[in-house]
């Protein structure tokens, strides 16, 4: 087998997507931790365009961006498939992955640095989108992939661990069992899968990281100048 390496950064849920996929496929790989404040020559050589992680290196060839990497892993190592074989079900899985990317990312970016009443407003918007995911994608299934986790579960995996730390840092819960009961159950089910449970960053360390990151974002917002009339468009 050609050598497989993964360049990553310990708090990144996007890196863990790739780790989980490789583990589920029983692919042996070497993990290389990056210092993103002092990027290595290896990272700059293999991802000169974006200069960020994750980067998968397979046989000396690099693939960047977590969703692209997941598709590459699925096509390169067909054992233990993460996508359905049925073309329609496979298309639906890709639709929900894209839905999360387009609908959840902007709301997440508003929620995490929000302060005051903005936090509750952003949390409510997040819940509305997640309710669609719960009703239309998860339904009454144990996992998005049915009885076993698949690529949709992996992509939404951030909600099962990282988001708990974010909620604690922000101070407003989003995945409330009274509002999103099935999604809340999915979170617990997902974290009990051995491949997931055994491959997560330390909770306390991750929480401290997100608290520091949020403080920086809030501070940056507070220092932005208030636009005058002639600045507004």
Image: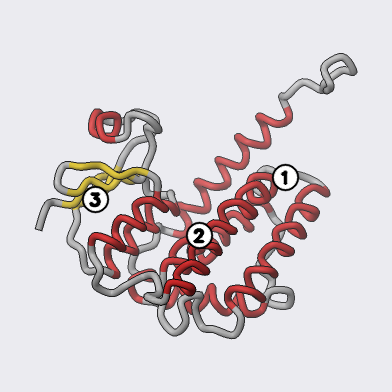
The 10 Å Cα crowd at callout 2, few under 14, some 14 to 19, many 20 or more, is: some
**Quadrant location of the C terminus in the rendered image:** top right
Establish if 184 lies above or below 41: below
Give the tally of numbered discs. 3
* Badge 1 or badge 3: first in the primary sequence: 3
Q: Which residue is rendered at x = 17% and y = 61% of the image?
A: 28
**Quadrant location of the N terminus in the rendered image:** bottom left
Foreground residue among 108 and 82: 82
Residue furthest to the top? 230
In the picture, measured across the screen, residue 200 lies left or right of residue 26, that is: right
Q: Which residue is mark 1?
A: 114
The 10 Å Cα crowd at callout 1, few under 14, some 14 to 19, many 20 or more, is: many
Residue 183: quadrant of the picture: bottom right
Establish if 136 lies above or below 221: below
In the picture, measured across the screen, residue 180 lies left or right of residue 158, that is: right
Query: Element at badge 2?
Result: helix
Foreground residue among 112 and 134: 134
* Residue 158 horizontal/vertical position (percent): 50, 59
Q: Does the residue at mark 2 contact the one at mark 1 (Cβ under 8 Å)?
A: no
Residue 81: quadrant of the picture: bottom left
Q: Which residue is rendered at x = 82% and y = 22% of the image?
A: 226
Q: What number is the disc on residue 158?
A: 2
In the picture, measured across the screen, residue 137 lies left or right of residue 53, that is: right
Q: Which residue is rendered at x = 38% and y = 37% of the image?
A: 52
Residue 173: quadrant of the picture: bottom right
Q: Which residue is mark 3?
A: 31
Q: Which residue is rendered at x = 87% and y = 17% of the image?
A: 228
Q: CA distance from mark 2 to mark 1?
A: 19 Å
Foreground residue among 129 and 95: 95
């Amino acid at each position: 087998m050609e050598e497989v390496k993964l360049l990553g950064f310990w708090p990144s849920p996007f890196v863990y997507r790739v780790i989980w996929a490789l583990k589920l496929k029983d692919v042996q790989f070497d993990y290389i931790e990056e210092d993103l404040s002092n990027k290595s020559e290896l990272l700059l050589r293999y991802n000169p365009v974006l200069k960020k992680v994750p980067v998968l290196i397979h046989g000396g060839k690099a693939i960047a961006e977590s969703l692209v990497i997941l598709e590459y892993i699925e096509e390169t190592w067909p054992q233990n498939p993460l996508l359905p074989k049925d073309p329609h079900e496979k298309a639906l899985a890709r639709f929900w992955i894209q839905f999360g990317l387009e609908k959840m990312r902007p709301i997440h970016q508003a929620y995490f640095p929000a302060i005051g009443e903005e936090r509750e407003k952003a949390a409510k918007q997040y819940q509305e989108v997640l309710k669609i995911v719960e009703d239309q994608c998860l339904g009454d299934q144990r996992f998005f992939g049915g009885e076993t986790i698949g690529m949709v579960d992996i992509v939404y995996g951030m909600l099962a661990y990282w988001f708990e730390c974010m909620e604690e840092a922000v101070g407003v819960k989003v995945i409330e069992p009274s509002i999103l009961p099935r999604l809340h159950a999915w979170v617990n089910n997902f974290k009990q899968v051995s491949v997931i449970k055994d491959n997560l960053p330390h909770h306390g360390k991750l929480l401290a990281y997100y608290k520091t990151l949020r403080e920086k974002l809030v501070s940056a917002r507070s220092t932005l100048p208030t636009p005058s009339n002639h600045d507004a468009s």
